[in-house]
Image: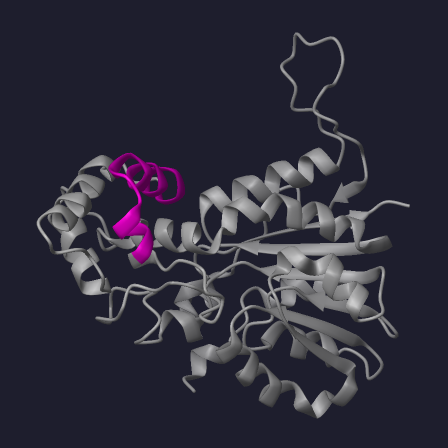
Amino acid sequence: MAEHLHLPVLLNETLQLLEPKSDGIFVDATLGLGGHAEAILNIANNIKVIGIDQDTEAIAHARKRLRKFGDRITIVHSNFIDIKEVLKASGQTQVDGILADLGVSSLQFDSGQRGFSFRFDAPLDMRMDADSGDPTAAQMLAEFSEEEIANIIYQYGEERFSRRIARRIVWKREIGEPITTTAELAEAVEKSVKRNPKDKIHPATRTFQALRIAVNREIEILEQFLIDSVDSLKNEGRLAVITFHSLEDRIVKQTLQKLSGKCFCPPRIPQCMCGAVRRVEILTRKPTVPTESEMRENPRSRSAKLRAIRKLS
């Protein structure tokens, strides 16, 4: 396995905010290859971790990496939206800390068959749980209307040429050449977008991000996961979340602010109607970001932002 697969993002900063202690029970809600979980388990020889992941390939790697910890690690094939059910099945009701690293793992991104990257010509799948039976990205592009595709690309990719891209995707479909591979999608985007020579990212980057988010319902389930995580913490327990793009970070920031008691109602409303109640203390007034040395060592960390809270008694 390539070396960068072993580099968990913002590791030291995450451990400082989670404060793993002896006898603690922690949840790694996005286990991935197990780097964060391994570091938590190494803090003390009686810490336990419940790892959740929906990617069976990642789970197989994590099992090998973490088997030295024996029954101190429990690995569950599930989506983090089911955190309450996972805890109940594990015999727990509340835990000392929860971590969620919302980035696509290097294993997924570097796979030549999963369709996450335009660096490989592969079937346009993009499902993090390849065994789920849910629609693939190719199926979405084959079935959704031009407006629906444009909205996904604009909302989740913040792509200003979303309508042009959607128009070309649907046109290809209508002439009997539906887009089914990563190379075909990347080509369609490149022909639709006016590329700025100063732009360092590939023109298809935002579209691929948007489709991945839509396929896996990443934004749709994020706010509820955060609320359920706070419910699942013991008093004084901590939640740490690492995001990798602005839309994701905005939802985490606003949800945690609301859980800290900040009201989002319009100022003229005489009484709070949004239901804000102070349940947590925000530990990161500004998000923690990688150091220059980490970004040099692991370039994929460059867009990471870490936010954390402590549950109030």
Q: Residue 151: horizontal and vertical position, in percent?
A: 34, 36
Q: Is residue 195 visible?
A: no
Residue 144 belongs to the span the image colors magenta: yes
How many numbered marks appear?
0
Q: Is residue 153 visible?
A: yes
Residue 41 placement, left or right of 104: right
Render colour scheme: one colour
Q: Residue 218: horizontal and vertical position, in percent?
A: 50, 51
Q: Nearer the viewer, residue 117 or 172?
A: 172
Q: Nearer the viewer, residue 41 or 80?
A: 80
Q: Residue at x 81, y 69 (%)?
A: 25
Q: Residue 120: horizontal and vertical position, in percent?
A: 24, 71
Q: Residue at x 75, y 36 (%)?
A: 260
Is residue 90 positioned above or below 280 on the image? below
Residue 94 placement, left or right of 222: right
Q: Nearer the viewer, residue 40 or 54?
A: 54
